[in-house]
Image (cartoon, rainbow, N blue to C red):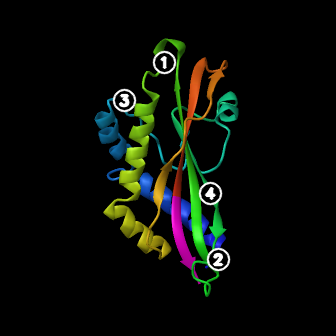
Amino acid sequence: MNVSSILRLGSSTIVEVIGDPTNGFNAALIQAAADNGVNAFEIDFSRKSRNFFKSNFGILDLLENDGADLPAICLYEDGDENVNLLTSNIFSGTLRWRIDVHLSWSNNDMAQDLDGLRYAVHDALVNVVNSEAAMEIWQTTTGLAFNGGVGLGGLGPLHWSPDQNLWIQTMPFWIRMVANVN
């Protein structure tokens, strides 16, 4: 199997893991939000979702064209790095996916604890991606054992959307995995 196939399969596997109605992101975020003293939100991971996209879309562009609802998540492949950990393999290195979480609020309802929201999302992603159920899905779907982690990025720039009359904050996260493909 080539690297691009693993990345595509990995993207689908991440969607299956975080979109699981019982053990996925939404269920984990309820607990993580409570632990961090913030309000949870819900993402629709279905194919016709207006707040989950398997692509690197500019959220402001989507909003201006009435193509999205907030909060929203964009998942996309963020590259790979072949570092020849095992020289006999076609690929031996790190695979990366990025998850951008886009949150919004009005002037009158400004989020008071962005760090708490960011930590809650991070905790939910870590708990879901590292769960036993996720490990089984990774092994069954990709043939690889998930051995990476979830990275927490800094807060992206705060944007004002005059069309929506909303403030929009982007929170970037990364999922990394070491893979040996022969």
> Could you tell me which secondary element the residue under label 3 belongs to?
loop
Pointer 1 with pointer 4, Cβ within 8 A: no
Q: Give the spatial CA distance, label 1 vs label 2.
A: 46 Å
Chief secondary structure of the magenta portion: strand
Mark identifier at residue 110: 1
Residue 101 percent location from the top left of the image = 53, 40
Label 2: which residue?
Answer: 2
First in sequence: mark 4 vs mark 2: 2
Residue 138 percent location from the top left of the image = 44, 68
Q: Give the spatial CA distance, label 3 vs label 1.
A: 13 Å
Q: Give the spatial CA distance, label 4 vs label 2.
A: 15 Å
Label 4: which residue?
Answer: 77
Label 3: which residue?
Answer: 39
First in sequence: mark 4 vs mark 3: 3
First in sequence: mark 3 vs mark 2: 2
Task: Report the residue that reaches farthest toward the bottom.
Answer: 88
